[in-house]
Image: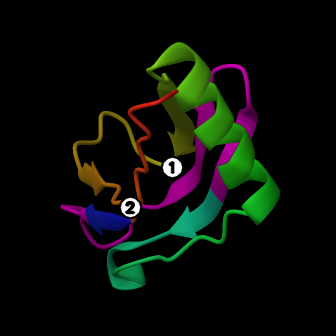
Amino acid sequence: ASILGLAPGQVIESVIVTVSGVGEIINLSDITAASGTLSPNISQALLDQIGAKLKADQSITATISGSSNYAPMSFNLRLAFDAIVSASPLE
């Protein structure tokens, strides 16, 4: 995850990413302009659950929530997931 646009002194106290039907997958805290790129660990079990839901529903819904020490605040949160999609024409 990359956080861009925070001013000095601004702190994102928490960022939580949840996937509908799976639950919380990322929980980051105390993010500042100096934090740069963050690499949260998502367990293999959660990744398997997300994959199963994606396969069954053919879509997933991710929700991002959190809190900060400053309002209003404007910043960009960029999430990138490395993924391998396998398909079988016989299934």
Q: Which residue is mark 2?
A: 10
- Report, in whole angstroms, how far the alpha carbon at label 2 lies from the one at label 1: 6 Å
Which residue is at a point 38% across and 33% down the rendered structure image?
89
Q: Compared with residue 70, is residue 54 higher up or lower down, i.e. above or below?
A: above
Coordinates of residue 27 in the picture (x, y in percent):
67, 54
Which residue is at a point 59% across and 67% down the rendered structure image?
30
Which residue is at a point 40% across and 59% down the rendered structure image?
81
Q: Which residue is mark 1?
A: 69
Q: Nearer the viewer, residue 1 or 71?
A: 1
The magenta span reads 4-27
Q: Quadrant of residue 28?
A: bottom right
Question: What's the mark number on residue 6?
Answer: none
Describe residue 71's horizontal placement relative to residue 39 as left or right: left
Q: Is mark 2 in CB contact (under 8 Å) with mark 1? A: yes
Q: Residues within 10 Å of mark 2 (few under 14, many from 20)?
A: some
Name the quarter where the N terminus is drawn.
Answer: bottom left
Magenta stretch contains residue 37: no
Coordinates of residue 50 in the picture (x, y in percent):
63, 39
Which residue is at a point 45% across and 20% down the rendered structure image?
58
Q: Secondary structure at mark 1?
A: loop
Coordinates of residue 76 in the picture (x, y in percent):
22, 51
Q: Residues within 10 Å of mark 1 (few under 14, many from 20)?
A: few
Q: Compared with residue 72, is residue 14 higher up or lower down, i.e. above or below?
A: below
Describe residue 7's horizontal placement relative to residue 62 as left or right: left
Coordinates of residue 29 in the picture (x, y in percent):
63, 62
Describe residue 11's horizontal placement relative to residue 76 as left or right: right
